Amino acid sequence: MKIVALAGGVGGAKLLDGLANCLAPEDLTAIVNTGDDFDFFGLRICPDLDTVCYTFAGISNPETGWGRSAETWRVLENIKKLGGPDWFRLGDSDLATHLERTRRLKLGETLSCITSHFCHSWGIRVNVIPMSDSIVRTIVFTDQLGPLPFQEYFVLHRCQPVVKSFSFEGIQAAQAAPKVLDLIYEADYVIFCPSNPWVSIDPILNVNGICESLHGKKVIAVSPLIGGDAVKGPASKMFTEMGIKPSAIAVADHYRSFITGFVLDHQDSYEKDQIYSWGIIPFETDILMKDQGDRQRLANEILTFCRDL
Amino acid sequence: MKIVALAGGVGGAKLLDGLANCLAPEDLTAIVNTGDDFDFFGLRICPDLDTVCYTFAGISNPETGWGRSAETWRVLENIKKLGGPDWFRLGDSDLATHLERTRRLKLGETLSCITSHFCHSWGIRVNVIPMSDSIVRTIVFTDQLGPLPFQEYFVLHRCQPVVKSFSFEGIQAAQAAPKVLDLIYEADYVIFCPSNPWVSIDPILNVNGICESLHGKKVIAVSPLIGGDAVKGPASKMFTEMGIKPSAIAVADHYRSFITGFVLDHQDSYEKDQIYSWGIIPFETDILMKDQGDRQRLANEILTFCRDL
């Protein structure tokens, strides 16, 4: 059974990790959002891609949900002493990734090639592909501060500004990274991981060709909301600010034109009928992934749900 | 007594440190070679400038002669795991300097402004100025490997290739950094520190205006060679490969058109007469700086020599 999963950072990475434990590596492809990427100190930083890779490699920081475990902060401490910006927390080990990635990008290598090389170095056998080798930048239009690059909204302003809309700068020219469309074509099922629909999955869906490639595919989305709240991140707040009551239903509605199945939490059981009425098969389980066991259990349940669709 | 000192890395930094302990900070200016600067991982690295600043700040590594004390290597270890280049040893604390400098350069700040800002952050009160805000690159022409950027010759090839000549790329367009010419004009004495004449002092002397500004000044050079050998670095080897017997005399001859006085080691006492015959006043002492005490003693002796000229 070949699976392609679209993912953002933390939540997506957890489910991907679970799926990797249930499938042969050649049967799982992760297509990762790069709309959050940005340049800091002239270095290309790809937060979602790194979270996914660090998680697969077993070197992610389980407490923060970003960055690396057993991290040190020597560089950042010294940057701070020189009066440099320290709002984005660059750990020493993490920084090596950004430095080497940027060095290779400057030599003309593509982000997908670099990611593949890094995965090899980190012992990752699952296929991890950035959604595009072109630069796409998620811009968050806010009430008071106007348009903000995603990381400024997310980290510098801690998601405080009220969101009005989003745009994905560069998306019109962005082609899917090599093999992405073929892999979707060959996939038995496509899974939208429990990532933020607005800023993690939407950028991927807006890359040229990806939307079209999903026509006729069996697509299953996993809700990132439980009882109207996001496990992590601003998804719930974003729904509210966009004038939509945050709920599993709202997520299913957001993905309505794409999905065959929808995975939601027991807490949101009462929303199943509505989703079913749209011709989408709901599947109810415990979707909170507190530990490694949860990841694998949920992945297994989702794969069984896929087979039964 | 106002002193301007021209310096490269290690040897120059030691004497500067001694001078800083003998003079009021406003009376000492260090004009530092930037011909060794290079870009690595897209970061601007200024080895001589950093060695001088780290030495003044008391955070230099006394064992290596470059980099910082109590350094850690987390970033470099992780770059190595990703297959990135590690021939230039980037320590974690040191890296912060390069990151913040590069960030500011990209914002349009000049290297001299950035250096001044860094000095303030590190508590350095002496005036440290890069020779120029323009990019100058020392190229070492070698027998077998052709032209090599200085750091590739120095670090990657460990000074092994036989040297044929040097050039300073960009020197024709390089103006002296702001205040450099005024400070030389106002100086009572200019000291050429015991740095490599070919690749540390010559680049500075070749910056537009600096050579001319020295006319009529009392200039004292300190030999970087003792008994024909360099305390550190390839100076002696370079003299030989350029067809000149390495000696204090050879250094004095190299600087002949500039200097009023010349400081050489007791070991080279027998060379004094020759130097004197050129109209240059020699001063003989123990010029090896093994510890902090030596730095201050030598600096004091040189200042006394200056006054007596």
Image (cartoon, coloured by chain):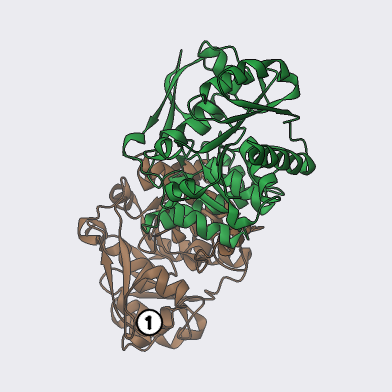
Chain colours: A green, B brown
Where residue A252 sits, quadrant-wise, is: top right
The residue that appears at 44% across and 77% down in the rendered structure is: B157
Residue B80 location (% of width, % of height)? 57, 64
B149 left or right of A179? left
The amino acid at mark 1 is: Met
A224 left or right of A172? right
> Which residue is disc 1 drawn over?
B238
Q: Quadrant of the C terminus of chain A?
A: top right
A93 left or right of B154? right
Where residue B274 sits, quadrant-wise, is: bottom left
The residue that appears at 21% across and 56% down in the rendered structure is: B173
Residue B44 visible, this orientation? no
User: In this orientation, which residue lies closer to the viewer: B22 or B292?
Assistant: B292
The residue that appears at 54% across and 49% down in the rendered structure is: B96
Task: State which chain disc 1 sits on.
Answer: B
The residue that appears at 49% across and 50% down in the rendered structure is: A186
Q: Is residue B236 above or below residue B10?
A: below
User: In this orientation, which residue lies closer to the viewer: A307 or A259?
Assistant: A307
Residue A295 location (% of width, % of height)? 73, 41
User: In this orientation, which residue lies closer to the viewer: A101 or A191?
Assistant: A191
Task: Tell how many labels.
Answer: 1
Residue B107 location (% of width, % of height)? 37, 39
Circle 1 crowding by C-alpha within 10 Å: few under 14, some 14–19, many from 20 = many
Residue B1 location (% of width, % of height)? 42, 52
Residue A33 visible, this orientation? yes
B115 left or right of B59? left
Q: Secondary structure at mark 1?
A: helix
Where residue A121 sits, quadrant-wise, is: bottom right
